Amino acid sequence: MKGKIRGLCLTLLIPLLLLMGCGQGREQAKEPSAEELLKEVISNQKQLKSGKMQMTMNFKAAMPLEEAQDLLGDVQDSAIQMDMDAELQFQEERMRMDGELNMQIMSMKIPVPIESYTVKSGDKYVTYTKNGEEWQKSETDVSGGDMGALVFAGQELYQGIQDESLTMTEETLELDNETSTECYVIHSSIGGEVLNSLFSMAGQVPGQENVLGGFRIEDEKVDLDLYVDKKEKEIIRTRIDMRQLMEKMMSDLTAQSGTDQTMKVDKFQIAVTIKERGETVEVEVPQEALDAEEL
């Protein structure tokens, strides 16, 4: 189950990057409604040539005893914090991510550096991932799933936003210690086939082929917040709350395995913030990664 959780977390990061990367703003004379603002963002969306983004993921849960023993003895409480930076070349379909994943078991924290590159090669997306000191290579068939549609098109995520769920507030978003931005925050949800597409990407990763088991993800929905710069009408942060869905999924998976143990999920949020829009970046895969053997 540890592998399933990690696969689901990592899988959601890539399409969220592209949701953040879309949209070109223009001034609007009156205060927009949530529906009007969402339509404006969608109608103005276009692919960036390149961009720099920052991702964070927070996961905290109490794991069933049997699962905890697989990790570290009888410890049940666990938390995962992931902080990643990403550089993307949209037209060339190349991406670099690096950062750190921290697993915390009670008072012990286990840092795991992460570095990966994804490039398009023919009809494949090739991903090079550094695990410790070793590089590993994996391939995904562009035509055989949703990877190509979601990773470098992003707009499909917008199609999953459920209009009946839209509300809007205003908030000052603190980007760092020196910068803040006045934002509209569109509160919405996504579900149906688009949510199913997000999770089906996990099934294309080696070792994650049956990540959902028999769980019907298309029948569910998750909360999504879009932070829109008031002046530029551009999305600068996307936040998705997976807590209730993950708790339900883990309960379903444990039931399928014949046990009544459940995982209590206290927090599971993923956020993507665009740091530099249109900044020229060059994504080059290092030779040591290119020499990696396929998984």
Image (cartoon, rainbow, N blue to C red):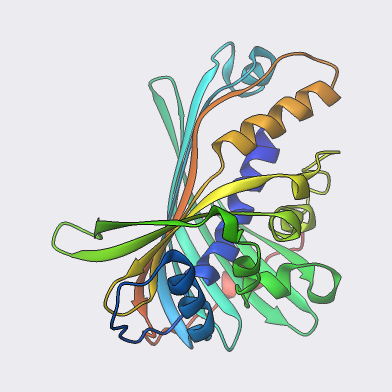
Residue 273's x, y, as percent? 39, 63
Q: Residue at x 48, y 85 (%)?
A: 44
Q: Quadrant of the C terminus?
A: bottom right
Residue 76's x, y, as percent? 55, 16
Residue furthest left in the image: 178
Q: Is residue 293 above or below residue 103?
A: below
The answer to whether residue 65 is visible is yes
Q: Quadrant of the N terminus?
A: top right
Q: Residue at x 50, y 25 (%)?
A: 78
Q: State which quadrant residue 153 falls in.
A: bottom right
Q: Residue at x 59, y 52 (%)?
A: 10
Q: Is residue 103 left or right of residue 252?
A: left
Q: Is residue 40 left or right of residue 148?
A: left
The answer to whether residue 132 is visible is no
Q: State which quadrant residue 32 falls in.
A: bottom left
Q: Is residue 261 above or below residue 237?
A: above
Numbered label tally: 0
Residue 206's x, y, as percent? 78, 53
| 229 or 79: nearer the viewer | 229
Residue 148's x, y, as percent? 72, 74
Q: Is residue 52 left or right of residue 137?
A: left
Q: Is residue 60 left or right of residue 200?
A: left
